């Protein structure tokens, strides 16, 4: 009898663990990148013109570099390192790659500066829906779009720099402070596991919610007779009709690769840190692929299929492409109009943004963790002082983005140059370190222990030759086509200059701390330059 | 929506859905102790 009970318990435990794994993967896969950044990026880069470089980047860059990052992280962890600069120093065998690896700390830190702000917008939207403050009612579609657009402008305090400190924006400031405090509290108390647990249940609810909203969007038909060209088929056509005319524009390729990296957290400094805590026998190949595939399903099949057609239906193609207020704005403006056309729209709207808020919290916590690990490793700090330093630094950074809110100029500058361009650089650096310094054969051998799936051999060729060439060509083309014009435009955009000062200050600080950490770890006899084969 | 658009959409969505299905099938087919081991790691990070 006892044996039977044990057998049943074991089976139940096994079942629970498997479902837990699936839900945990799904939970970690979903974030603001899927439902807000992807649709905005795709719309602004021409819809169908964006999808071709997007899928190309997914197959040739996102998935293989993700595998490389998982393998490098686990290897670095075995050597006793947990931060991107130190792990890359070991993989890249020396200080050059280690110091270039500081971008693996810069990216999660700076992306957090604005990501947390967007989280607070989700909280505000959820609050407004649940308290009746965002009811577009049965007004004409044009009026609904106008109300939705003005609501977004208020929530994001876009009217002027420093508008958030005006009395009529008190709610914006409160939402910011609540979100900031929650993030810091969760990191300080190490409650990310608890938040993950909540997300294991919240994410399936969000998936169901997304499916219902998707069905509603697909059945909208032509809701505004005054604009017969704005219908579901036009929305789908904008997203999927292959458009080869923009394939010569390096910015589209850069944006597509950047979106793939952002959404998969590849080239982000997050996976490499997370994987450094894995054991040698833990699988990294199937885990990495499952996380990527689930993420893509949420991003393309749900996030994209909901928001892009909705934006075309209610805003029109031209406005959808030019939506003011940055990459993340499309979803905030178009979806409230969709909810206004649904039964129980307020409930769905509130649930949607609250789930998005929860999903974003887990993602932002995963951004703080690599920076905290970096401070603890390099400065030999305990958790509490590391969290305090992190709190002070992120308060300044998040405050900067929140203050310079006019047309979201600071957010957009940081999102493109750090959230796309620098991620691109880190991805290239990791690929170079993995394929050419560590060695592709050795890297593949490192991926094998515990693997539930073997990386197909063709990826050796892709990772060593195809992906680096791809990255190099896009990088050079982008620099030639865009950088000179951008540098010239800086004189008319002081906020972009301030944002660059912030980025350079952060890089300088991280380099100094990395140097101090390298000296300290070397003095302790650690193999920081990867000289010992292990 | 052009024929090319329909084709691109159907192929892309099918490929993504198929990949998710294959991955989860392999996750579910993996030995329990492997899964448990990995599940424990979720908390380590």
Image (tube, rainbow, N blue to C red):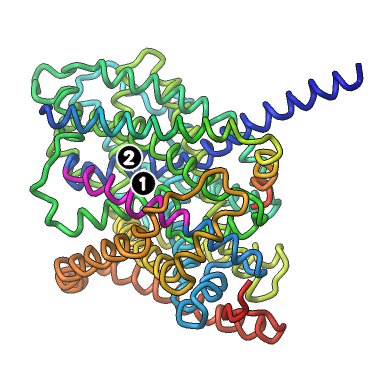
Which is nearer the eye, A313 or A124?
Answer: A313
Residue ID at (50%, 63%): A443
Residue A164 appearing in the image: no
Say which residue label 2 marks: A152
Which is nearer the eye, A76 or A271?
Answer: A76
Q: Residues within 10 Å of mark 2 (few under 14, many from 20)?
A: some
Picture layout, residue B23 above or below residue A175:
above
Question: Which of the numbered marks, if any, corresponds to residue A156?
Answer: 1
Residue ID at (34%, 23%): A214
Span highlighted in magenta in the image = A49-67
Question: Which of the numbered marks, if any, corresponds to residue A59?
Answer: none
- CA distance for labels 1 and 2: 6 Å
Q: Are marks 1 and 2 in contact (CB under 8 Å)?
A: yes
Quadrant location of residue A448?
bottom right
Position of the C terminus of chain A, as image quadrant, is bottom right
Q: Residue furthest top?
A: A343
């Amino acid at each position: 009898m006892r044996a039977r009970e044990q057998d049943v318990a074991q089976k139940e435990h096994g079942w629970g663990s498997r479902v837990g794994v699936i839900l945990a993967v799904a939970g970690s896969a979903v974030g603001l990148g899927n439902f807000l950044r992807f649709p905005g990026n795709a719309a602004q880069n021409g819809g169908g013109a964006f999808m071709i470089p997007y899928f190309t980047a997914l197959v040739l860059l996102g998935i293989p570099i993700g595998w490389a990052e998982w393998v490098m992280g686990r290897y670095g962890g075995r050597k006793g390192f947990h931060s991107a600069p130190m792990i890359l120093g070991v993989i890249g065998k020396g200080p050059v790659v280690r110091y270039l690896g500081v971008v693996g700390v810069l990216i999660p830190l700076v992306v957090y500066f604005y990501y947390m702000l967007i989280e607070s917008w989700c909280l505000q939207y959820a609050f407004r829906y649940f308290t009746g403050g965002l009811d577009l009612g049965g007004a004409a579609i044009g009026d609904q779009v106008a109300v939705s657009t003005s609501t977004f402008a208020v929530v994001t305090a876009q009217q002027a720099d420093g508008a958030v400190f005006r009395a009529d924006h008190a709610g914006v400031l409160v939402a910011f402070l609540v979100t900031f405090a929650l993030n810091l509290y969760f990191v300080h108390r190490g409650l990310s596991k608890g938040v993950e647990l909540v997300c294991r249940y919240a994410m399936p609810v969000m998936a169901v919610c997304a499916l219902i909203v998707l069905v509603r969007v697909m059945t909208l038909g032509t809701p505004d007779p005054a604009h017969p060209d704005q219908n579901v088929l036009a929305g789908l056509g904008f997203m999927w009709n292959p458009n080869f005319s923009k394939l010569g524009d390096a910015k589209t390729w850069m944006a597509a690769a950047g979106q793939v990296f952002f959404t998969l957290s590849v080239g982000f400094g997050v996976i490499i840190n997370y994987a450094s805590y894995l054991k040698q026998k833990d699988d990294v190949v199937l885990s990495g692929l499952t996380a990527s595939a689930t993420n893509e399903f949420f991003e393309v099949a749900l996030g994209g299929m909901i928001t892009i057609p909705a934006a075309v239906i209610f805003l029109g193609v031209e406005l959808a492409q030019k939506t003011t207020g940055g990459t993340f704005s499309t979803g905030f403006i178009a979806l409230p109009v969709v909810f206004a056309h649904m039964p129980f729209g307020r409930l769905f709207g509130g649930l949607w943004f609250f789930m998005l808020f929860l999903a974003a919290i887990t993602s932002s916590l995963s951004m703080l963790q690599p920076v905290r690990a970096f401070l603890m490793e390099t400065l030999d700090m305990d958790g509490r002082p590391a969290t305090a330093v992190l709190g002070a630094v992120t308060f300044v950074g998040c405050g900067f983005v929140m203050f310079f809110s006019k047309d979201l100029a600071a957010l957009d500058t940081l999102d493109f140059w750090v959230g796309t361009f620098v991620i691109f650089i880190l991805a290239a650096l990791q690929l170079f370190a993995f394929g050419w310094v560590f060695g592709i054969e050795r890297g593949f051998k490192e991926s094998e222990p515990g693997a539930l799936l073997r990386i197909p051999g063709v990826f050796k060729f892709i990772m060593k030759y195809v992906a680096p060439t791809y990255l190099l060509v896009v990088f050079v083309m982008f620099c030639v086509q865009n950088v000179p014009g951008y540098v010239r435009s800086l004189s008319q955009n002081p906020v972009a200059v301030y944002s660059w000062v912030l980025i350079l200050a952060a890089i300088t600080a991280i380099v100094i701390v990395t140097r101090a950490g390298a000296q300290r770890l070397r003095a302790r006899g650690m193999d920081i330059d990867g000289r010992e084969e292990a | 929506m052009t024929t090319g658009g329909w084709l691109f959409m159907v192929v892309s969505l099918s490929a993504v859905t198929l990949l998710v299905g294959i991955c989860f099938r392999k996750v579910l087919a993996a030995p329990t102790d492997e899964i448990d081991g990995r599940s424990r790691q979720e908390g380590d990070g």
